[in-house]
Amino acid sequence: MVEHLNMNKKTRNLSLAALFTALAVISLYIAGTWPTGQLGLTAVASLFVTAAIIESGIIYGVYVYIVSSAMSMLIVPNRLAPVLFILFFGFYPVIKSLIEQLGQKVLQILLKLLVFNISFFIIYYIFSELVNALVSFDLNIIIIFLIGNIVFLLFDYGYTKLIWFYINRISNLIKKGNE
């Protein structure tokens, strides 16, 4: 009987991960075909990684991230959204989940900023190399860097509110459907 319950739980988790992966890939596909919504829809795709973490655990969030990244690179016509997903938005929910287990708010903020800034510089380097326009660190990049950090903190705050909404409204509906 216990084996049967474990199998049902594994099947449920795998099914939810597949569903969240499909929704993430759909979001990334739309982002890749709709230029004005690329950044927003790429962020929306990351919510499905978060949903997998909430519903099934961090390992399923990692699965959703990896499979969504691979599938979107194969089928999305414009690679900007999948690259942004791979380099930041897709793995950030996993990192955020781990960091927020630490408990200390100041340490959490510093670690999140560290993750964002590493991703920011990698993305900056890749895209500047692609267009062959690597600019030296002048006032413009410093301003972009500072604005980026402020926008990131606002993004993280809003993301936390969306997670709260998901846990308190949507996750409860999913759990009721399993009873």
Image: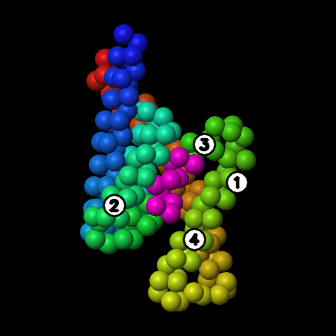
In this orientation, which residue lies closer to the viewer: 157 or 133?
133
Does residue 91 show up magenta in the picture?
yes
Tag 2 and tag 3, C-beta contact below 8 Å: no
* SS class, disc 4: helix
Residue behind mark 1: 110
Q: Which residue is mark 4?
A: 122
* Residue 48, horizontal then vertical, whole percent: 39, 46
Residue depth check, mark 2 versus mark 3: number of the one nearer the observer = 2
- Give the amino acid type for the residue marked by disc 4 in the picture: Ile
Can you give x and y, in whole percent of width and height, for residue 124 in the image?
A: 55, 75
Magenta highlight range: 86-95
In the rendered image, the quadrant that contains the C terminus is: top left
Question: Mark 1, mark 2: which one is toward the viewer?
Answer: 2
**Residue 6 lies in the magenta-colored region:** no
Mark 1 residue crowding within 10 angstroms, few (<14) / some (14–19) / many (20+): few
Q: Give the labeled residue for mark 3.
A: 98
Q: Residue furthest top?
A: 1
Relative height, residue 167 to residue 162 (above, below)? above
